[in-house]
Image (tube, rainbow, N blue to C red):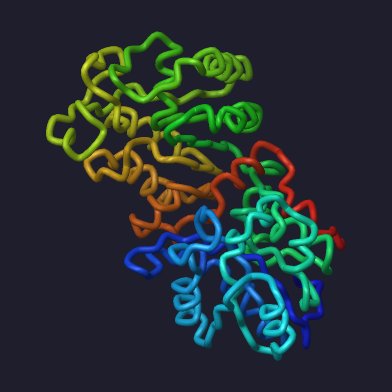
Amino acid sequence: MRDADVRGKRALVRVDFNVPLENGDVADDTRIRAALPTLKALLDGGAAIGLVSHLGRPKGSDPKFSLAPVARRLSELIGKPVRLLDDSVGPDVEKAVRAMRPGDLVMLENVRFHVEEEKNDPAFAKRLASGFDLYVNDAFGTAHRAHASTEGVAHLLPAYAGLLLEKELVALGGILDQPQHPLVAIIGGAKVSTKMDVLRSLVSRVDTLAIGGGMANTFLLAMGRPIGRSLAEPDKETEARRVIDEVEGNGKELLLPIDVVAAPSPDADGAPLAATYDVDEVPSHVAIVDIGPRTIERYAQVIAGAKTIFWNGPVGVFEVPAFGTGTCRIAELMAASGATTIVGGGESVQAVEEAGLAGKMTHVSTGGGASLELIEGKTLPGVAAIPDRR
């Protein structure tokens, strides 16, 4: 985007404003705030902006998924009116776009109201691009999707990366290219099946691979440890064993729980009966809901010695406060570590935001799936479609 002369131009800007709503208002504006530097730079440069985003997974046009609350919140944050158009394509939209003057800011209605968006329909992409002079992709969170608004329009207009997209690629690319060692990767979350590829891609890069959350249960199961009624994927035991062997074969450290918090149920009802167990002594009637204090201490030692830390996914059922100790402690340890700290999207971001520690991390990613696919070394369609002008 720094290469573009935007004065007097109408810019179509893909943002990721897929934010949670509550009682008709934006409940978390992190993604909106993250896009402000790009929007302000374009406005300061003399551009008019048309914003395009999706919200949720609507089945056709649905008022519940309107971007109206997002437009209101953006207007408050940027300090100027943000007009929400009735649609993302069509004659009325094109007329409004062509009427824009430098400094104007409009938002197209939810682009996923049209099924052609996710199909990356060329005709739909052409309708989206109509009336605009250039395209800026600032939606890292959707850059791994080849949709009309993320990939299709980039072939129809002069295409540039926004400042947030650039920031994400530099921060996450640093893990791939030249990270400072020791490099520690902490990977959590519910299912190992969604993160097996990223685990295997990290083995050759990291010094320590720490696995927590529900996905750690599959690894414990593969090692013959009792996990009671815990969430696990028995069909992934062989792949988990392969990762264990690869870590050991590469001379790296694998950090799995040595003690856990377990309860009769993984919800608030189970909290009063939760207890700490050694991983060899988990009873058959309980489910693992968090890492235990001795495991947290191992995390503390590894984090204290790290120069670079990448974290994606909670290590417990952190949405239940009683089971969020391990996840919160990791956030605190990372914030105080002095290392380069990168939080890779999803619930990890929610955890550091709720702990008030996001500002103490080197980089907090706005993309969960996109950050993992980048770490895996996959090509992101929304990035690949933007010409390299260097």
- Quarter that holds the C terminus: bottom right
Q: State the residue at coordinates (44%, 20%).
A: 218
In this rendering, would 387 be left or right of 266?
right
Against 195, residue 313 (above or below) is below
In which image quadrant can residue 8 be found?
bottom right
Residue 31 percent across, percent down from the top left: 51, 63
Q: Which quadrant of the view contains residue 21?
A: bottom left
- Going by the picture, which residue comes out furthest to the right? 390
Residue at image location 40% in from the left, 40% down from the top: 314
Q: Position of residue 16 (x, y in %)?
A: 57, 61
Q: Is residue 287 shown left or right of residue 389?
A: left
Residue at 40% from the left image edge and 51% from the top image edge: 336
Q: Nearer the viewer, residue 361 or 225?
A: 225
- Residue closer to the observer: 182 or 368: 368
Across and down, in percent, residue 220 comes to: 40, 17
Instruction: Name the quadrant of the N terminus.
Output: bottom right
| Image quadrant assignment for residue 105 | bottom right
- The foreground one among 380 and 223 is 380
Report the residue at 53% width, 64% height from top. 17
Do we see residue 170 in this rendering?
no
